[in-house]
Amino acid sequence: MVLPPKMKLLLFLSSQMAIFILFIHLYSYNFNSQNMKEEPKPTHMHVLVLSSWRSGSSFVGQLFAQHPDVFYLMEPAWHVWMTFTQSTAQRLHMAVRDLIRAVFLCDMSVFDAYMKPGPRKQSSLFQWYTSRALCSPPACNVLPQDETISQSDCKILCHQQPFEVVEKACHSHSHVVLKEVRFFNLQVLYPLLRDPSLNLHIVHLVRDPRAVFRSRERTAQDLMIDSHIVMGQDWQKLKKEDQPYYAMQVICQSQLEIYKAVQSLPKVLRQRYLLMRYEDLARDPLAQTARMYEYVGLKFLPQLQTWVYNITRGKGMGEHAFQTNARNALSVSQAWRWSLPYEKVSRLQKVCGNTMNLLGYHLATSEQEQKNLSLDLLSTWSPYQQIYQEG
Ligand SMILES: *[C@@H]1O[C@H](CO)[C@@H](O)[C@H](O)[C@H]1NC(C)=O
Ligand SMILES: *[C@@H]1O[C@H](CO)[C@@H](O)[C@H](O)[C@H]1NC(C)=O
């Protein structure tokens, strides 16, 4: 068959077109299938320091915050709670969970819901200057990355940085560590533990409820809004003198439930949980810090070892209200024994006894036992060892 030249040209062009379309198609197919094959792999390590008020979590937070690979935020969910001060911990659970998920993924737009509209700074974040990452490049360029800047200097020198630098700082670190006291069960965190885009590891920090109780008594005014949210609607029905015990009951119960829930997790998920008693950390800060670092895959760099050594001997950390140093912590952790009346101890042990037994805090059965300091009320039994043995 002889085709006119025009027809030949048309045929030629359309065949070229077909090849071109095929190419586009293959290319996009390839592109899509590549995308589909690639699971959203977590590029960061995500660490949640799960604790309660007055339990040394700011100190543990600092142990992480000081590491050059860590982007740290203290209590991001404070913003949620302070937006809904009439609510309850249970009702705010999901909002808190979703907020920390977004923050772990460095999506700071989540704060839009909890901050005033209009331009904001990185200093709009609660206790932002406790994050070394927000006091150093790329968030704030006053000093090179490896030089330390004090929190008070950071507050002055870096508070004008725009809010956008928070995301930038988050992306430029391999580890995102968040400290939260606003979770009251583990179930709410299950979706995050199973989320393929997250690599969540939990450090559950607990402290002797009697020491917590004493410390809460001394900061009751600061904790008032939080305590009302913890107690839910119930606090208004309670006598004022009963409220501290009820708040502790809720807190102890939640720690018990978290600890128990871990035991029933599949083994792979159980390995994402580390129990840390504050007293063990106070007695041997270097060894316990090494344990936490190893668990989340951080190198215990020589300068950090010196830093921990220094602060636990009272050097290097200021007298800021939110800071605790471990050397004081060791004597402070015993202070309840001579400063709390036995009737309070006894009453608290009634509401927190189960939790204390489980975590290895011996009950004082008399005033004599409570005041006798040669009697060690901290069990050497290590709950975390038990978890791994059972697995
Ligand atoms: C530790 O303390 C010593 C002595 O006060 C000081 O020279 C050193 O710079 C401190 N190191 C760190 C990492 O804080
Ligand atoms: C204090 O406890 C120690 C150790 O259990 C015991 O030997 C001692 O008798 C106790 N002292 C008093 C005054 O109860």
Image (spheres, rainbow, N blue to C red):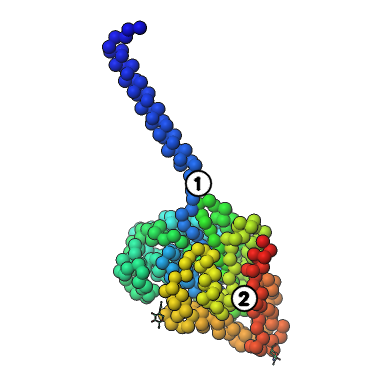
Question: Which residue carries the number 2 mark?
Answer: 209
**Res. 66 mark:** none
Q: What's the CA distance linking mark 1 and mark 2?
A: 43 Å
Q: CB atoms at circles 1 and 2 under 8 Å apart?
A: no
The x, y position of residue 35, in whole percent, is: 46, 42
| Quadrant into which the C terminus falls | bottom right
Identify which residue, 190 or 67, lies in the foreground. 67
Q: How many marks overall?
A: 2
* 324 to 204, vertically: above or below: below
* Res. 236 in view: no
Q: Residue at x 58, y 66 (%)?
A: 274
* 252 to 192, vertically: above or below: below
Decide if residue 384 is on the left or right side of residue 136: right
Q: What amino acid does circle 2 point to? A: Pro
The x, y position of residue 125, in whole percent, is: 41, 65
Residue lying farthest to the top in this orientation:
1
* 65 to 285, vertically: above or below: above
* Res. 19 in view: yes
Residue density around tag 1, few if under 14, some if 14–19, many if 20 or more, within 10 Å: few
Q: Nearest to the eye among marks 1 and 2: give it.
A: 1
Describe the element under mark 1 as helix, strand or loop: loop
The x, y position of residue 161, in whole percent, is: 33, 64
Q: What amino acid does circle 1 point to? A: Glu
Which of the two labelled residues, at mark 1 and mark 2, occupies the earlier sequence position? 1
Q: Residue at x 40, y 57 (%)?
A: 171
Decide if residue 226 is on the left or right side of residue 237: left
**Res. 39 mark:** 1
Image quadrant assignment for residue 4? top left
